[in-house]
Image: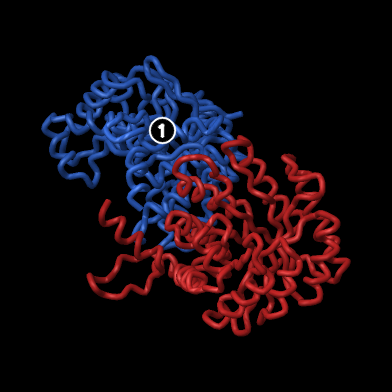
Chain colours: A blue, B red
């Protein structure tokens, strides 16, 4: 039974086939968020703070932290954000950067066992990222592309994932500490993206026996009703074996998809988490114990 | 490749693993609808008419027609409703009753090849319903319970389904004309209802090779945010092999779940149906070509 343990100083999260789905909050990322990028570059982390707390309240199990701002001092900003967030919440973090110095800087201040996002199958990435993972005893997201790019053939992507797992082992990193991202392609451009991905997720679970993650929202790129399509995709991917995803926990339809999938898989005893998340507010003015997404859902349903 | 063909006088619908999911509209059913029941008993079928058209517009592929009103003349009312609906739409129908005389009366006026809902594995039901199916060349929903009730053991339910398929063959009814309902239990009461049902649906597809249907909304009985949970359940069940469901096509979240599942399974070329259903209205006042659910979704998303 493959279990990927991620931790902060005082809290452990397990990603695994027998565990509830692991929701990695994607919001702390300046890519495509101009205001956040400008604030972070100026050392104003107030939005990082509020995004962190909102995601935790909404049910994120891990928070992804990315500080990729052009021309900014990414290693310093990433480390500062990690220290700030770890002072606010015990939710474990995913340290997200394409710059090795930033990963190194983030790992050096991180309290606990981080998830590092990410390494690809490219030789030069493997050679610099994997020693860092080994040195810090972290876990790593392995993206299944290499020097030749992203293959449309799921069997090729499987082989790239397998290669990364094997190379990680050479550095003493256990397969359970490699979480494979099979790469979600936009189905609007590539019609069999869904069917092929489901097959690939099943192979990764059954043959390579690794945990998996993905950036789910990429699937619906360019199509209308993206939240509805993301929801169907997420539920089905979890049914096929997906054990975590980098996603927005503030989106109620996607949240219902992953929490509902836990129920269908028998991973929410007595539906307790579902009921806590989605129960109707008790009375006007009363404070609900449910998550942010749940409260909004309650209001929306009454209006419909 | 198992294909269940259902038809009206001029339109065919195929239920099958290689075909888009078949959505059977559940609305024309007086059970739990007091006003509709009273109207139908008095021969006022205006709501039957509007429910039929609304469901067709929203994307129902088949319409279930039930006239089960206590103390009313069900055989006559069912036949009248079938004739009325067949005069309005070419959408094939599912003739739904627990009274054999009503099934007989409905079948005798039906134009095309109907789906009959339903027969169970109980001996006395098999002996009266199956000859009727054979005589009219219809297809039949086979509910996997028998004299001993509904087993919580999915293997027992599989055996009941297998028995019905075999008994149907004795009457000359082909396995492709038996659509098995594996019976959806409320997960709030039975925690492993989802996991067991997914296994059962896979066995029905892989071993018995039959098409399947279910009353999906039963899964969420008693829980909050039923539409969100129904959506997750439906997407995952389709991923496991479910080929049709009796459901409400006017519910946008469930509709996104089944239309999204078609995309994930590679059954919506160029995402054309998805785009048609969910695209944003062109401009205020302009008429959208999308289905009812889609237009509501468009408005809702803009408001959110």
Q: Give the residue at x 79% y 69%.
A: B174
**Relative to A250, B181 lies left or right:** right
Q: Is residue A111 above or below residue B122?
A: above
Give the position of the N terminus of chain B as an image quadrant. bottom right
Q: Residues within 10 Å of mark 1 (few under 14, many from 20)?
A: some
Which residue appears farthest toward the top when viewing the image? A10
Which residue appears farthest toward the right when viewing the image? B170
Give the image quarter of residue A297.
Answer: top left
Which residue appears farthest toward the left when viewing the image? A42
State which chain disc 1 sits on: A
* Residue at the disc numbered 1: A127
Q: Is residue A24 visible?
A: yes
Q: Is residue A135 visible?
A: no
| Nearer-the-camera pick, A94 or A137 | A94
Residue A166: image location, x then y, percent: 54, 34
Residue B23: image location, x then y, percent: 56, 64
Residue B32: image location, x then y, percent: 55, 55
Q: Give the residue at x 38% y 18%.
A: A112
Numbered circles on residues, count: 1
Residue A21: image location, x then y, percent: 49, 35
Q: Give the residue at x 52% y 43%.
A: A238
**Relative to A108, B89 lies left or right:** right
**Relative to A201, B113 lies left or right:** right
Q: Secondary structure at mark 1?
A: helix
């Amino acid at each position: 039974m493959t279990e990927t343990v991620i931790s902060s100083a005082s809290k452990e999260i397990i990603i695994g086939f027998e565990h509830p789905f692991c929701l990695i909050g994607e919001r702390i990322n300046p890519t495509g968020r101009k205001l956040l990028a400008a604030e972070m570059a100026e050392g104003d982390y107030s939005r990082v703070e509020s995004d962190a707390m909102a995601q935790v309240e909404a049910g994120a199990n891990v928070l992804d932290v990315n500080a990729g701002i052009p021309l900014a001092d990414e290693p310093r900003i990433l480390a500062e954000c990690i220290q700030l967030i770890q002072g606010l919440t015990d939710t474990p973090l995913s340290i997200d950067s394409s710059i090795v110095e930033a990963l190194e800087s983030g790992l050096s201040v991180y309290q606990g066992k981080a998830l590092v996002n990410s390494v690809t199958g490219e030789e030069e990435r493997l050679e610099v990222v994997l020693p860092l993972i080994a040195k810090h005893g972290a876990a790593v997201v392995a993206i299944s592309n290499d020097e030749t790019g992203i293959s449309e053939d799921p069997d090729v992507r499987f082989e790239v994932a397998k290669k990364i797992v094997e190379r990680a082992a050479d550095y003493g990193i256990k397969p359970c500490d490699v979480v494979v991202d099979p790469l979600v392609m936009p189905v609007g451009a590539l019609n069999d993206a869904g069917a092929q991905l489901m097959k690939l997720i099943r192979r990764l679970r059954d043959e390579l026996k690794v945990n998996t993650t993905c950036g789910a929202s990429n699937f619906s790129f360019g199509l209308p009703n993206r939240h509805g399509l993301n929801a169907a995709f997420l539920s089905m991917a979890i049914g096929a074996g997906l054990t975590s995803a980098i996603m927005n926990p503030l989106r109620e339809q996607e949240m219902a998809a992953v929490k509902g999938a836990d129920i269908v898989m028998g991973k929410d005893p007595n539906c307790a988490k579902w009921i806590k998340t989605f129960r109707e507010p008790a009375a006007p003015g009363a404070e609900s114990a449910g998550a942010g997404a749940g409260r909004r859902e309650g209001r929306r349903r009454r209006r419909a």
